Image (cartoon, grey):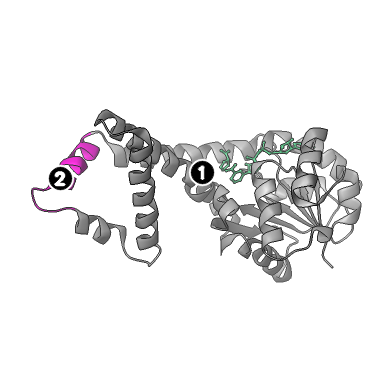
């Protein structure tokens, strides 16, 4: 039996716990740690998984999944370092944090895999990108892939691309939610009741996502909606006039830069 401990059961940590359970892992194979006693009780009641302290998790788990905010990593590593089991695999879900940080702070030879997941994990539709650290071999990558496939899709990427991946798919769902929010407001502007506007836009988003999922090119799909002298081209002209495409390029570049900055905050010296 492989014991998996989720260290920090917030939004992503809880999504992973629930996904692993849905994917067939038993509650007895899972552990989690949380700072707040109320949160421990809530999650234990909801999932039947045992909440333990970080030292206990490190002593018992074969796979330690780190899901705290990057800003909270240092005290966690202080607790983890003296207790981690020889050969245990560390899986980091933290934005920006390089595998070298864990390798420096944990016992020599600890295998580390860096992952960038996203919140659609809660509906089994995560996009996760994984990269091996210095001591992680093909078996470690395959194990992480197997775990993450229970909550969505997985791609292997060189670690040097992880900051860009974080900006694209890690934060990506937020851009779509933002767009949906703005489009629902447009319905309000046009006099449509909010609940109807939300239904129109959300179902349009679901339908568009399903069409994209058939590997059809987004340009072809958009052109099929855009009739000569029709309604869509009038909207597209406004989007171009307001620089929405350039704004997206700049926004995603800014997110990439922030991910790199989060990693640099933990550099040695
Ligand atoms: N929210 C998102 O969309 C995504 C988040 N991530 C990464 O996942 C990590 C977690 O993010 P969220 O779940 O959004 O944050 P969150 O704030 O919801 O969860 C973090 C949890 O860790 C707990 N925690 C902090 N220090 C702890 C410690 N020493 N021991 C035990 N528990 C501790 C906190 O109490 C909190 O519940 C971050 O590093 C973030 O970069 C990655 C991809 C997407
Ligand atoms: O905003 C953040 O820092 C996290 C990482 C990727 C998505 N959310």
User: Residue 75: where, in percent of width, then height?
Assistant: 81, 35
Whereabouts is ligand 1, in terms of quadrant?
top right
Q: Residue furthest left?
A: 229
- Mark with earlier residue (2, 1): 1
* Residue 234 location (% of width, % of height): 15, 41
Q: In the rendering, at what x and y percent does residue 245 appear?
A: 30, 42
State whether label 1 is within 8 Å of ligand 2: yes
Residue placed most toward the observer, 46 or 87: 46
- Looking at the image, is 13 positioned above or below residue 239? below
Query: Splitting the image into 4 quarters, where does residue 211 fall?
Result: bottom left
In the rendered structure, the answer to whether residue 258 lies left or right of residue 238 reads: right
Q: Foreground residue, 235 or 73?
A: 235
Instruction: Please state, as top left, top right, bottom left or bottom right, where the C terminus lies in the image.
Output: top right
* In magenta stretch: residue 266: no
Which region shows up in magenta? 226-241
Quadrant location, the N terminus: bottom right
Classify 10 Å Cα crowding around label 2: few (below 14), some (14-19), many (20 and above). Answer: few
Helix, strand or loop: magenta stretch: helix
Mark yes or no: residue 30 visible. yes
Q: Which residue is mark 1?
A: 171
Residue 210 pos. (x, y %): 39, 61
Assess disc 1: are there few (<14), some (14-19) or many (≥20) residues with their C-alpha within 10 Å of its C-alpha: some
Which numbered tag is attached to residue 231?
Answer: 2
Left or right of 229 in this view: 252: right
Secondary structure type for disc 1? loop
SS class, disc 2:
helix
Label 2 CB, ligand 2: below 8 Å? no
| Residue at 84% over, 59% down | 28
In the image, what residue occupies the spot 71% across and 40% down? 68
The count of marks equals: 2
CA separation, marks 2 and 1?
A: 31 Å
């Amino acid at each position: 039996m492989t014991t998996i401990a989720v260290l920090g059961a917030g939004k992503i940590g809880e999504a992973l716990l629930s996904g692993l359970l849905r994917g067939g892992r038993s509650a007895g194979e899972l552990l989690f740690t949380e700072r707040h006693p109320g949160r421990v009780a809530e999650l234990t009641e909801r999932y039947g998984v045992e909440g333990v302290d970080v030292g206990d998790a490190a002593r018992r788990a074969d796979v330690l999944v780190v899901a705290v905010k990057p800003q909270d990593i240092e005290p966690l590593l202080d607790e983890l370092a003296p207790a981690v089991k020889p050969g245990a695999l560390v899986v980091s879900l933290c934005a920006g944090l390089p595998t070298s940080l864990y390798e420096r702070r944990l016992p020599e030879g600890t295998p580390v895999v860096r992952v960038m997941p996203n919140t659609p994990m809660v509906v089994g539709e995560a996009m996760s990108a994984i990269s091996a650290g210095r001591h992680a071999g093909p078996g470690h990558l395959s194990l992480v892939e197997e775990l993450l496939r229970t909550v969505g899709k997985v791609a292997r990427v060189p670690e040097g691309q992880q900051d860009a991946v974080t900006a694209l798919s890690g934060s990506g769902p937020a851009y779509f939610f933002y767009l949906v929010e703005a489009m629902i407001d447009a319905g309000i502007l046009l006099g449509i009741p909010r609940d109807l506007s939300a239904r129109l836009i959300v179902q349009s988003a679901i339908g568009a996502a399903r069409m994209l999922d058939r590997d059809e090119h987004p340009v072809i799909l958009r052109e099929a909606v855009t009739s000569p002298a029709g309604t869509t081209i009038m909207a597209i002209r406004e989007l171009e006039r307001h620089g929405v495409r350039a704004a997206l390029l700049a926004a995603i570049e800014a997110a990439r830069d922030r991910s790199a900055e989060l990693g640099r905050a933990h550099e040695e010296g």
